[in-house]
Amino acid sequence: MAEVAPPQAADAVPAQIEQQDGGDIEMNGDGNGSGNGDEPIQADGQEGEQQQEELENENAKEEQEEEQGDKLPEDACETLYLQNLNEKVRIPVIKETLYSLFKPYRPLQPVIAHRNVRMRGQAFISFPDVQSANEAKKDVSEFPLYGKAIQISFARGRSDNVVKKLEGDDELEKHKVQRLEEKKRKRRNNPLRQKAQAKLKAEETGAAPLKKQRLQMPDEYLPPNSVLFIQNLPEGTTADDLREVFEVHAGLVEIRTIPAKKDIAFVEYADENAATVAKEALHNFKIDGETKMKVTYARK
């Protein structure tokens, strides 16, 4: 009867599996060993650290955006200025609608809106504090009210309602006085008003009103003309001297000198084309060999 070989003892496991550099060896199911710091485990660790870093960066970015969103603008105040309101809606209706629209932000009564031409399509609404006004501005801006998107900005100053609520009746009176003084100052410094007053004063005194100075087009950009304007002529230049130069070009009609101003003259040709040919040829021509004369179209 054949003998069956006994199972191999544990001591017979290949001795090549040894501990290296003090590291622990773990046996896989297939008999292969792997250390604690082998490459797959390291890769997983690096990926986890990278994901953790990205998550922290995203959280920091969100916190920064929240802080910036909560920061109040430099021009913030308790009163909002509304524009682009539907002008066809009656004033009492628009006031009531605006108060209902801003009710979550605790608006103060009354809502200010007028039917005059200068204030048409505009309104003012105040709140008990700057934070509420800023929140209302961010949330309600561009809201489509009666078919038109509301445009909202902070008012230039505090309303009477805000001053009265926060500082009392005494400060309200001071605020009204300051507002009226500022209004008068702006009216006094209004350029249109100053111009009208100057005109009225000139009429009363009989003085001629100041005429607005007209800006003239430079000679080099004047439109074509059959008459040429000659400038910078040397002293002693005569009409015969000019004729000798300009008659070289066909179509010369007349040369006119100015006795009172001997450094200028006018040269006329039969048409604009002939004048243009002469102008292009003789501009900067040195009639005395030294001085360049300037040739342009005459003003019509």
Image (cartoon, rainbow, N blue to C red):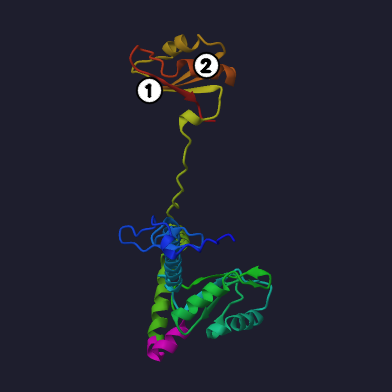
Report the Cα–Cα distance between label 2 and label 1. 19 Å
Which of the numbered marks, if any, corresponds to residue 70? none
- Span colored in magenta: 159-171
Residue 277 x/y as whole percent? 53, 16
Question: Where is residue 15, by image quadrant?
Answer: bottom left
Q: Quadrant of the N terminus?
A: bottom right
Q: Which three-letter amino acid code belongs to the residue tagged 2?
A: Glu
Q: Residues within 10 Å of mark 1 (few under 14, many from 20)?
A: some
Which residue is label 1 attached to?
A: 232
Residue at the (61%, 76%) spot, across then down: 115
Q: Nearer the viewer, mark 2 or mark 1?
A: 1
Q: Is residue 153 above or below residue 95?
A: above
Residue 112 in view in this figure? yes
Residue 49 in view in this figure? no
Question: Where is residue 167, by image quadrant?
Answer: bottom left
Foreground residue, 16 or 272? Answer: 16
- As for residue 282 lying within the magenta part, the answer is no
Q: Is residue 125 above or below residue 215?
A: below
Q: Residues within 10 Å of mark 2 (few under 14, many from 20)?
A: some
User: In this rendering, would 35 be left or right of 246?
Assistant: left
Which of the numbered marks, if any, corresponds to residue 254? 2
Q: Quadrant of the C terminus?
A: top right
Q: Which three-letter amino acid code belongs to the residue tagged 1?
A: Asn
| SS type, badge 2 | strand
Foreground residue, 64 or 124? Answer: 64
| SS type, badge 1 | loop
